[in-house]
Amino acid sequence: MVIAGDFLPGNFMLLMGTAFKFDAVLSNLSTTINTMMDGAVPIARVSSLLNATTRRKVLLFGGQRRKRVLGEILNAPGGADFEMDDTAISFINVCYDRNKDRARHSPGGESPLDPAFQEQDPSALGPFTAILPQGTTTAVTGSLKGKKTLLMLLGRFMLPTDGIISYPDNLRVRFIHGEPMMLQGTVMDNLLFGNKKNHPEEEIITVASLCGLSKRLCLNPHTDIGDGGNKLSLTEKISVCVARALLSSVDLLLLAGTLDVLTFAHAEDILDLIGRWVHDRGMQCLSAESTGPNVLLKKKKTCVYVTNTKGLDAKADLVMKLVKLDDGADLRAKDEEIRQLKAKLAAIDPQANDSNRNNSREPITTPPVLNEHLISDYFDRYDINANGVIDSQTELEQLVTNIVFKIDLKIQNTTLVEVVAKRAETICDSPLTKESFKVWFENELLPWADPGY
């Protein structure tokens, strides 16, 4: 352009001088733009992590949601008569729909534009209402899908799309998948993980052995398990995970199909162990749990397990069966089944009739289930010294606690503790035989029971 005469030499020199003068500024500007573009990617990643759904956020949101839903129930017509047992595990109109859950976490909120979110999930769980008392084992069975989802909801790893699940916030929860999670390290490292109390290594190995861990690993607890436990069999992984949960002072143990991959005998042994753990409110072989407060003052232990193995549900105190009632015929059949069960109960115990129970306020008499066989069985089981008498406070506490639990005797814990402690003062000088224990139980404990028993 300069040669052709279209651009004057003076203007060209002025342009070049200006360019050289601002060269550093233009270069820095280009560098700054490139740096900002490079930093945009990690900033976006950090932002997504900070905004991601975490367990803490889920628990916080769930707590706020439970208060809101409970408030709506209480403010509804007739809500003033609603009473919820704060000590039990309560499912109130619980429903979980995967599509609604996706809608809740989508950018569009509760009503996204995607029509797929509006379709009902064919495998939706609920709605249902149930009460699980603490201090029990419950088997979740049935042909419907959603059994493991129910445990995920119970463990508060997910939130129901409708209704609420309520239980005391101070419960320590452990969830074990069908494919257990193992940590890098040794068998002992995995058994120690999550322990709230310091247990001696000998006691830790005892618990692992009771859970069915192989003798090879019990004798060599510092064996490296490999990446993700690939040096262990699935049975050994499950034994380690169940033992780890029992060692961690857990209060609510959730087994999501864990026992179905074991042999029937092994699964039964673990359920028997869990049953004793529930009844004793801890592992008696652990000195940190067998000493301290009276067993009646300890937090109750609860286990809920999912199983598809026929016969394992018989080990549970309660069975929650997920079935689909397709029509009125199914409902009538279920009503007839309930009516027959009530009739059988009334034939065994006339006091089970609702009208008799509401009107009768007479002193309690010996329940039919408190028979000689029950007394003899539990007496022999908790006669630690095997001398035919109960002559220590520990024996008396364990015997009374388990019989009260077995016959579901409704009596306040403080009263029970006082009555047992009073008899324990003279237990060494005046031991109890089977006959005298039965008389003492009937005369000193039963009168304090709920008259509606």
Image: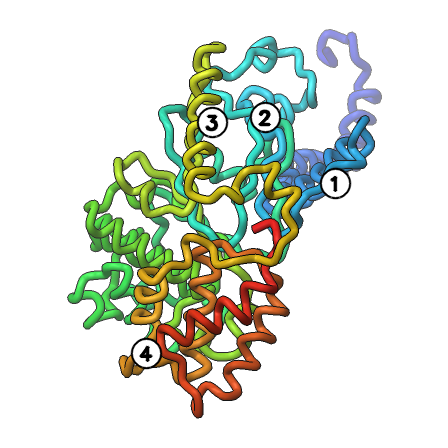
- The one nearer the camera, 428 or 241, is 428
- Find disc 3 in the rendering and name its residue: 339
Amino acid type of disc 3? Arg
The CA distance from mark 1 to mark 3 is 36 Å
- Dot 3 or dot 4: first in sequence order is 3
Question: Is mark 2 in CB contact (under 8 Å) with mark 4?
Answer: no
Earlier along the polypeptide chain: callout 2 or callout 1?
1
Q: Is residue 208 left or right of residue 128?
A: left
Q: Position of residue 124 (x, y in %)?
A: 50, 21
Residue that protrudes farthest toward the left in the picture: 216
132 and 6: which is toward the camera:
132
Q: What x and y, as percent, mark residue 16? A: 76, 28
Can residue 35 be seen at all in this image of the molecule? no
Dot 4 surroundings within 10 Å: few (below 14), some, or many (20 or more)? some
CA separation in Å, label 2 and label 4: 53 Å
* First in residue order: circle 3 vs circle 2: 2
Q: Which residue is mark 2?
A: 101
Q: In the rendered structure, find residue 384 and report the number of the disc placed on it.
A: 4
Residue 107 lies, in percent from the top left, at 67, 23
In the image, residue 184 lies at what x, y percent? 34, 58
Depicted 81 relative to depicted 366: above or below: above
Task: Look at discs 3 and 4 and give the one toward the viewer.
Answer: 3
Q: Is label 4 or label 1 in front? A: 4
- According to the image, label 1 marks what residue? 67
Q: Nearer the viewer, residue 329 or 44?
A: 329
Q: Point out the tag, 1 or 3, that comes first from the N-terminus.
A: 1
Q: Earlier in the sequence, mark 4 or mark 1?
A: 1
